[in-house]
Amino acid sequence: MKVLIDEDAIRQKVKELAGRISEKYRGEELVVVCVLKGAFIFAADLVREIEGVDVLCDFVKASSYGMNTVSSGEVRIDYFPEIELEGKNVLIVDDILDAGYTLKRIKEEIEAKKPKNCEVCVLLNKPERRAVDVDVDYVGFEIPNEFVVGYGMDCAEKYRNLKCVAIYEG
Ligand code: IMP
Ligand code: MG
């Protein structure tokens, strides 16, 4: 396991992203939709750094079929936000934008609920791996094409509790 992004760099980046989000939505209501499971730690840290915004939190759970490290493009929605999204500002928060299938599908499902506005925030972006186009509004870090774990992200459900983002080397 090799550290790619350490705890301090993550904390600083989360503050920076939360600052931009706070500025954009100051005095308004914002429904933060955390993509389970991988984004749970990032979203928890991010919402606590957002200031001057009425933040509501909900979740979406999607899975691509199979347990392998390469996503298949078939995305199933297992849980969808209970909070009414129509007419709301919505911010989808995910851990990593990889091939893009998951976020694309989630964004389409959320947009179908006719929110006032729908933005996407990801901690990590692996641009080399993109298979479908997804518009992302806030990106923490661009990373190379490596499988990473920690800070919520897993390999077969392990390593989510690491404080840093690390390259998984088997
Ligand atoms: P995709 O964009 O549909 O390929 O799938 C993205 C999802 O796959 C992410 O939200 C993660 O949950 C998972 N994922 C992709 N790359 C990695 C990685 O390097 N480590 C851990 N999970 C990953
Ligand atoms: Mg995910």
Image: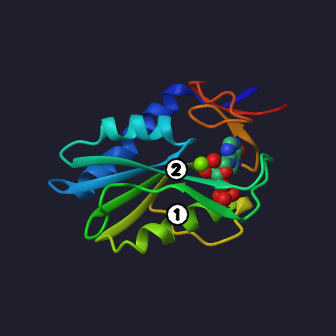
- Disc 1 or 2, which lies upstream in sequence? 2
Q: Quadrant of the N terminus?
A: top right
**Ligand 1 contact, mark 2 (Cβ < 8 Å):** yes
From the image, tell me which residue sits under label 1: 106
Label number found at residue 94: 2
x, y percent for residue 44: 40, 36
Q: CA distance from mark 1 to mark 2?
A: 10 Å
Label number found at residue 96: none
Q: Residue furthest right?
A: 170
Element at label 1: helix
Relative horizontal placement of residue 118, taking residue 101 as reference (left or right): left
x, y percent for residue 37: 56, 41
Q: Which of the 4 image quarters holds residue 128?
A: bottom right
Element at label 2: strand
**Label 1–label 2 contact, CB within 8 A:** yes
Q: Which of the 4 image quarters holds residue 100?
A: bottom right
Q: Quadrant of the C terminus?
A: top right
x, y percent for residue 7: 53, 26
